[in-house]
Amino acid sequence: MKSKTFIHDDFLLQTETARRLYHEFAKAAPISDFHCHLSPADIATNRRFNNLFEIWLEGDHYKWRAMRANGVVERFCTGDATPLEKFKAWAATVPHTLRNPLYHWTHLELARYFGITELLNTDSANAIWNQANELLASDDLTTQGILRKFDVRTVCTTDDPTDDLKHHRTIASSKLKTRVFPTWRPDKALAVGQPELFNGWVAKLETQSGVSISNLNHFLEALDKRVDNFHANGCRLSDHGLNQCPADFCSETVAGAIFDNARAGRTVSAEEQRQFATFILAHLGERYAEHGWTMQMHLGALRNNNTRLLGALGPDTGFDSIGDFPQGRALSAFLDHLDSRNKLPKTILYNVNPTDNYLFGTMIGNFQDGTVAGKIQLGSGWWFLDQKEGMECQMNALSNLGLLSRFVGMVTDSRSFMSYPRHEYFRRVLCNLIGRDIENGEVPNDDSLVGPMIRNICFCNAHHYLQLGENVS
């Protein structure tokens, strides 16, 4: 007897209660994708993808890591192999990803985008390639078509302060119902330890801000002008990718001397880099509070571990890992610095090391002040933790230490327009977790109590917290 399709209506839902909660309260909720790395240009031009490689494998370092582990040479990951050859190399790898979340995501995405329920492997590769490519020619699977198909109400991309935001303005003036906003990501503003990169970036900042930058005050003025410009273009979030939150406070005089050294191409010590980062982030944090923005911090990744392949392929190609950086003391000091001035903005903290779940879960409670429900958030399972076990661990920590009911939920954190089923995956995990609690007698079997909480976590909490778009009842 043939078993039912792998991706079926009750996928990951292990109890009758979980199934009821998902289908009645989670499944139909819209999506707020408030942190991603989608290309604003692709949305503005309503890009049509030529084949399954372009929409699915192009730039996906999750898949590249799995392929390399399976003995696939680099030519079929980031090299000069044809799109079909790269897809077939991925198809041959998929059966070896059992128990890796890639196996779930792969088949969930094939089902939701193309209605393909056949398992991907070497034998099925050609048929799946042809069927998907035929459907990619339809208007439903252009970039804007995908946003409509998955009822994505808001998208927040990740944008450098030197970006002119022209694509965002094009989108804003279009008929696209999805509201697409920039997110301020000023990581390069901290890069005084790399003077050549830093000075090249400052030159771009001068052009975009219209400020001639010859000292620290000019630099701050230019950053502030760009913050104002981002705000005028709909930005309501910042984002920072850091090993650790810095908390080496220094005077403006010291920060100015560090800035001058970097501008002159002189060596900046590790201590000076931390001091400068602390000074700039504290300054920006106050601007965020004044503008009503939400500050996001993605902490703990150890990046670019393989120097040989970094040199050959560049960053963001699949050679990053979880880091074991101490987080608590500095994070506390930085948040307290802003809070003591009544300048702590709404903040979402994402940890990539699962051992920090309880640290971050208790840290957010230190700075809740009653002004905004869930003002300080423990962000969803991120990067290596955006899978079933990681999501459950994050939600269990938040439940034990704070208010799961105020959680702003899932983000795709993705460069791929094929990633929207990540929200479905999260919602199934959430409903399975709560459904199990109900059946164990640990949570009341009361849909009027539990149902709204699930709906809020799936969409409404984020929508209200971030103040993006129209009101939601």
Image (spheres, rainbow, N blue to C red):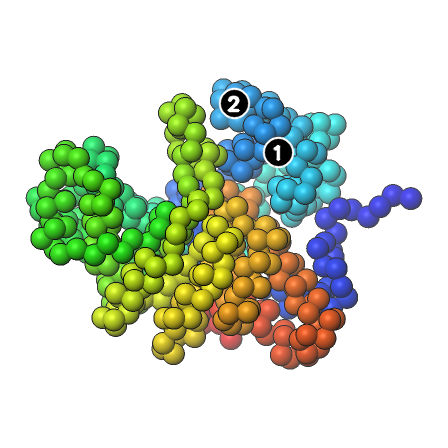
Q: Amino acid at mark 2?
A: Glu
Q: Residue at x 35, y 50 (%)?
A: 244
Tag 1 secondary structure: helix
Image coordinates of residue 339 in percent, x first then y, are 28, 69
Which of labels 1 and 2 is toward the front? 2
Q: Is residue 335 visible?
A: yes
Above or below: residue 401 compared with residue 110:
below
Residue visible at 39% across and 42% down? 41
Is 345 displayed left or right of 414 in the figure? left
Question: x and y percent of residue 222 in the render?
Answer: 16, 51
Determine contact: label 1, label 2, CB under 8 Å: no
Q: Amino acid at mark 1?
A: Asn
* Viewer-side residue, 444 vs 90: 444
Q: Quadrant of residue 207?
A: top left
Q: Is residue 50 visible?
A: no
Determine which residue is flagged by label 1: 133
Q: Quadrant of the N terminus?
A: top right
Of 247 and 381, nearer the camera is 247
Q: What is the number of the mark on residue 74?
A: 2
Residue 147, x across and y down, in percent = 52, 52
Q: Nearer the viewer, residue 307 or 22?
A: 307
Q: Residue at x 54, y 64 (%)?
A: 397
**Label 2 Cα neighbours within 10 Å, binned few <14 / some 14-19 / many ≥20:** some
Q: Earlier in the sequence, mark 1 or mark 2?
A: 2
